[in-house]
Image (cartoon, grey):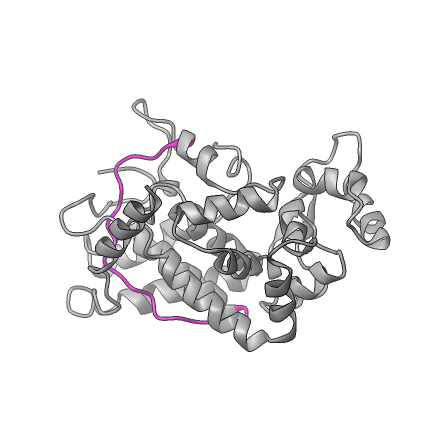
Amino acid sequence: MFFGLFSLKQCQAYYLTPNYYDYTCPQALSTIRTAIRDAIAKERRMAASLIRLHFHDCFVQGCDGSVLLKDTPWFTGEQTALPNNNSIRGMEIIDAAKRAVEAVCPGVVSCADILSLAARDSSEYVNGPTWTVKLGRRDSTTASKDLAEADLPIAFENLDVLIGKFAKKGLNAKEMVVLSGAHTIGQAQCVTFRNRVYNETNIDPGFAIHRRRGCPSDNSGNGNLAPLDPVTPNTFDNKYYKNLMQKRGLLHSDQVLYNGGITDGIVAGYSRDSSSFYADFAAAMVKMGDINPLTGSAGQIRKICSAAN
């Protein structure tokens, strides 16, 4: 079953190309880039949110913009699924980029492609790696809360579960570790790390005490935020991996990457070599962008990203 899925992905990804809009909408990439950079200039945290939004899109039904769809009488979308509810952000930024690109070439550029470009542009803005984005995805007409809850990783999962969820998408353990490095930027809610800072033992005691101050044990303050990387929270770098080696991973799902398991060596390598991390992150983002795209006559080009035409 796994190999069948992977072959399908490879076949579909064949139709994606970096120059897809060169003739149909030559202003597309610069127009989207401006909208994304303007948004991050106003709120630097948005870079992490947009990278995460692309990730959460690709892991459910493939990179088809389904995460952007609001609920309808016919389906319950992905935004209220447990890994997304009151957590995913940046949909309004994608909407703004869509409006901007529709103004120059209506009905041409998909929301799924805007998500892919937004992730790349966000990484670049915060001093992270850049990569060539393959384009030509089309937008889904449906979304699935159930699939989102089944397929998306969550903060409380152990290493074997995480490896399995990535493998289901054709991504290996090393690619899982490098994509997790996106947690070098962004913030997490108290509800996602409360158990770790109060009950887990593979955690630096001083770090745990510090994080408890903003995350009460009595289930209040669930939405209180803490940086995933307390050292350089707004800059894309390899400090995330250094933190894991010091038992300062904020989420359980972060620290399991360096906890005596098969991914310890990968974490250690990236902690020493930022250039390797950057190169591998870029390659993994390209590969993730190839997950089950809709191409050709499949799907549609949405007029607005939050609703099917």
Residues 144 and 234: in front is 144
Residue 159 in the image: state x and y as whole percent. Answer: 59, 47
Residue with the most extreme top position:
73
Residues 4 and 64: in front is 4
Residue 198 in the image: state x and y as whole percent. Answer: 80, 40
- Report whether 91 appears left or right of 177: left
Q: Quadrant of the N terminus?
A: top left
Q: Is residue 72 magenta?
A: no
Residue 276 in the image: state x and y as whole percent. Answer: 53, 74
Q: Quadrant of residue 133?
A: bottom left
Q: Quadrant of the C terminus?
A: top left
- Work out whether 148 lies above or below 276: above
- Report whether 104 appears left or right of 204: left
Task: Mark yes or no: residue 208 visible.
Answer: yes
Secondary structure, magenta segment, majority class: loop
Q: Quadrant of residue 189?
A: top right
Q: Residue at x 33, y 52 (%)?
A: 291
- Work out whether 203 lies above or below 278: above
Residues 140 and 29: in front is 140
Q: Residue at x 74, y 42 (%)?
A: 196
- Report whether 46 appears left or right of 201: left
Task: Mark yes or no: residue 185 visible.
Answer: no
Residue 119 in the image: state x and y as whole percent. Answer: 43, 60
| Region rendered in magenta | 126-145
Q: Quadrant of residue 267?
A: bottom right
Q: Residue at x 63, y 64 (%)?
A: 265
Q: Is residue 134 magenta?
A: yes
